[in-house]
Image (spheres, rainbow, N blue to C red):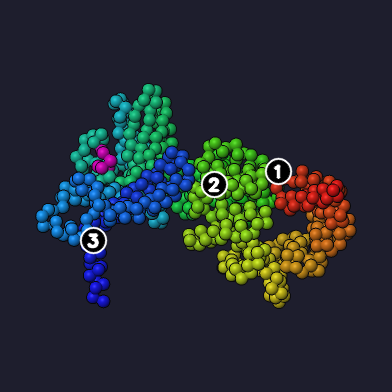
Amino acid sequence: MSKSPNKLIRFWQELKRRKTGKVIVAYAATAFILLQLADILTPALSLPSWTTTLVTLLLALGFPVGVIFSWVFDITPEGIKKTESLEVSESKEIVTKPARRIFRTSNIIIAALIIVVGILAYPKIFKRDTLEKLRSSGERISVAVMPFQNMTNDTTWDVWQDGVQNELINNLTNSEEFKVKQAESINDAIQSKGLTSYASITPSIANGISQKLDADIFIIGTLKHAGTTIRVNAQLIDSKSKEVFKSFQIEDVYKEERIFKLVDSLSGEIKNFLILSKLKQEQSHEVQTTISTNSPDAYRYFFHGRNTFRKENYSAARNFFSQALAIDSNFAVAIIYISTSYWNQGIYDQSKKWCTKAYEKKGQMPIIQKLYTNWLFASNFETPHEEIIYLSEILDIDDQLQMPYFLLGNAYNDFYQYDKAIPEYEKALEINKKLDMKPPWIYNYSDLGKAYHKTGKYKKEKRLYKKAEQDFPNDPVLIYRQAILAFTHRDSVTANKYVDKYLSVRRDNTDPEASIMTGLADLYSDGGILNKSEESYRKALSLQPENPDRLNNLAWFLIDKDRNIIEGLELIEKALELSPDSYYMLDTKGWGLYKQEKYQEALRFLQKSDSLKPIYNHEVYLHLEAAKKAVAGLKQ
């Protein structure tokens, strides 16, 4: 027992003697600096998104090499030599001392590295989101506007040093967002410092004046002249940290009467920047990453639309998105949402029209928006294969966005690849949980629950619905899935309770009775209660006997479940008389003929269905492939 402490002491002494600790500190500091450089240069030089990962991996691999090298070798004035054993070193210690110059140099290098790390880390740790903290404090931002410096070499513009200041103060004062210091108190503070010329107002002096007036932010700027152009420059600066939030530059024709237009533009940009900062702070990282507009009003309309969209009131949502576009015609994400709202309703011609509008603006978009537009194009004109590619590219750039994971899950679901869909859906929920945010809508739960159900993960499915009940109580989509799970477990008592609840909620929502009966029929069908499913499909048809969709629903059920293929084909004939170019009704007819082993005729209808389908449909694809294979077998 007594020898263990001695070994530890000797090991610690060896670490100090071999300077391994210094190497570890120096390596860590250098690695941090290199990672920061990689983080900065990767987007700036358009390097691949995995560049930072590669640098991290190389640095991690190099760490043990560096530690071992420092233990075995030593850097001396004579060069790199193998480190002497402790006994040899101690015998020489009396005769000669370590080279102090090398020791001092290594200390200086390490100190310099630590200082650089501190400089890089400081804004990330202490200055992060300074403006957002101001905006989230619940109080109005206090702003001090300094007189603008005349740097035009034309003294006739001196009057506008105070003039621009006064106009900005007046414009900003009209906004409820700000508490603006008036020119009198600012200029009194300037005079109290004994300044006789506005040219003497440096950013440091302006900062002192701003702090004296208890202003959160100060604005300092210049008037410049270049050829036939007058240019107004301004900076928005934090009074405490001296951090420059944003720089502004406005230009116009070099005429005094144009100055009011310049100031109006400048004050508008400043107001929009500060208000947008508040609006963005209220949203998630995902929203801040994907939404871009310079108009607070457009921003507000967009979020009204997005919230309405999540309630599946797509018509009202489009109205909000359209108002956002009326303010900012380049607000690409609003166009994407309009297209998606039509897509969700099955109005594919309008979805494609708006998708094309977004696609035409792709060149003006940031990379994330561009990739979302590519995804939208794929969903309208290509296949889930392409959707998966574009969504994966988004996640290569930012893997903390929940929406691409959710959409990836949908893409895999479209291929019936439920095992691949599950981890994508789970990751989307994981991100929402980490951010302590409720998922955007019920489908984050129900689509994952369906994937669990299809792969036999019933316990996970049940736990998921318990959590979903907390976020989306009484949601008919959730109740639908819960009823199916109960039927699967042969728990008819619980299942019937959910059925009654499903009917009650949908009737409270004033949904059409025929639509409710169709939903109930789908529920029974998915739950394996086929007699009640058929009964409900027939009731829905009795309520709307001339509705082609009701005819198709019953026809499809009778054919696909092998209940009554002949009746199913009779019903689909009536439906096709009303909607002769409906791709999904043609698919129903083709599938019925396939079930009757009339493969040549089935192939003809399924090919027509495939040619008329507005978007990719995996079920139509599988039916067509089955018919092709059957026909090929006949020929053989």
Q: Residue at x 71, y 71 (%)?
A: 487
Q: Does dot 2 land on a helix, a strand or a loop?
A: helix
Residue drawn at 47 percent across, 50 percent down: 280
Indicate the position of residue 150 as horizontal and vertical percent values. Answer: 30, 31
The amino acid pointed to by label 3 is Glu
**Which element type, helix, strand or loop, lies under badge 1?**
helix
Residue 333 percent across, percent down from the top left: 56, 45
278 left or right of 109?
right
> Mark 3 vs mark 1: which is more N-terminal?
3
Give the amino acid at mark 2. Glu
Viewer-closest of 194 and 116: 116
Residue 49 at least partly seen: yes
The local secondary structure at tag 3 comes to helix
Task: From the top left corner, tell me how far across and down residue 571 is, in percent.
Answer: 86, 56
Which tag, 2 or 1, sits closer to the chain's start? Answer: 1
**To which residue does mark 2 refer?**
393
Seen in the image, is 225 located left or right of residue 563?
A: left
Q: Quadrant location of residue 489?
A: bottom right
How would you rate the neighbour count of disc 3 (Cα within 10 Å): few for under 14, some for 14-19, many for 20 or more?
some
Alpha-carbon neighbours of circle 2 within 10 Å: few (<14), some, or many (≥20)? some
Identify the magenta region. 201-206
Q: Which mark is residue 349?
A: 1
Residue 523 to residue 587: above or below: below
Marks 3 and 1 sit apart, C-alpha to C-alpha, by: 76 Å
The label shown at residue 14 is: 3
- Quarter of image, res 518: bottom right
